[in-house]
Image (cartoon, rainbow, N blue to C red):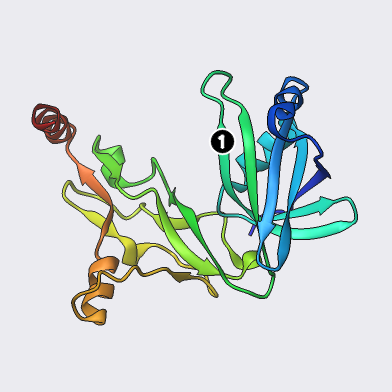
Amino acid sequence: MGDKITLKLNERTAHGKKVRALRREGLVPGVVYGPGIDPISVQADNVTISKVYAAAGKHAPVHLTIGTKKKIAMIKDADISPVKNTIAHISFHAVKANEPVEAEVPIRLVGEGESEAEKAGLIILQNIEALEVKALPMDLPDALELDITGLKEAGEKLTIADVKIPENVELVEHESGHGDENEEQHSINEMQVVAVWEPRELAAQHKKAARDA
């Protein structure tokens, strides 16, 4: 985990059509909900909400202060206005510090530009951008690291098994409903995260994909 992400929210009294007036004032309406609590209508200024969303995404806990109430929550959803490209509404799901949560965490490539493959003019293509993991809220990592410095030749690949999974964090396995559990886990671990391509071969693949689309 990186630095603790905090956000101060005000309880919201405006609902329905009155919410439009909030947005015109630069405020973002939202809601905080979760097990054991009544939903709380909230609001905060757009600049602050945007900064928190950029920092937390949907994979980092946010420490909320709502009046005298303190909550730990994950951002469940953020509606983006297609016209203004600003957050029109945000939803927080309250969680407990001592109960594991599931979240999609981005994969960060370590050593970009340093591998022999890249120095030789080859292209490293990332096929999987994030993985779903399970951990206590405060143990959720900002990103899962994958070291690509050892890649050398076209055709080489790195799989989920090569991704560095921190202690106290586990991958979420989605059962397919068939097959042996060990075989299924093996197939998940073998899923390709990055691959090394010759530029010409990659361009040819893109052209073929465009023709087949």
Check disc 1 and report the residue beneath it: 79
- Is residue 4 something that shows in the picture? no
Q: Residue at x 83, y 51 (%)?
A: 66
Q: Is residue 77 above or below residue 98?
A: above
Q: Residues within 10 Å of mark 1 (few under 14, many from 20)?
A: few
Image quadrant for the N terminus? bottom right
**Count of number-bearing discs:** 1
Residue at the far front in the pictured view = 16
Q: Residue at x 11, y 31 (%)?
A: 204
From the top left corner, tell me how far across and down residue 33 is, in percent: 67, 56
* Quarter residue 94 falls in: bottom right
- Is residue 128 something that shows in the picture? yes
Pick the residue in front: 23 or 112: 23
For mark 1, give the secondary structure.
strand
From the top left corner, tell me how far across and down residue 200 is, in percent: 13, 30
**What's the amino acid at mark 1?**
Asp
Q: Is residue 202 above or below residue 97?
A: above
Image quadrant for the C terminus? top left
From the top left corner, tell me how far across and down residue 46 is, in percent: 72, 30
Q: Tell me: 153 left or right of 111.
A: left
From the top left corner, tell me how far across and down residue 143 is, in percent: 51, 54
Q: Residue at x 75, y 45 (%)?
A: 41
Q: Tell me: 41 left or right of 118.
A: right
Q: Tell me: 35 left or right of 158.
A: right
Q: Tell me: 204 left or right of 149.
A: left
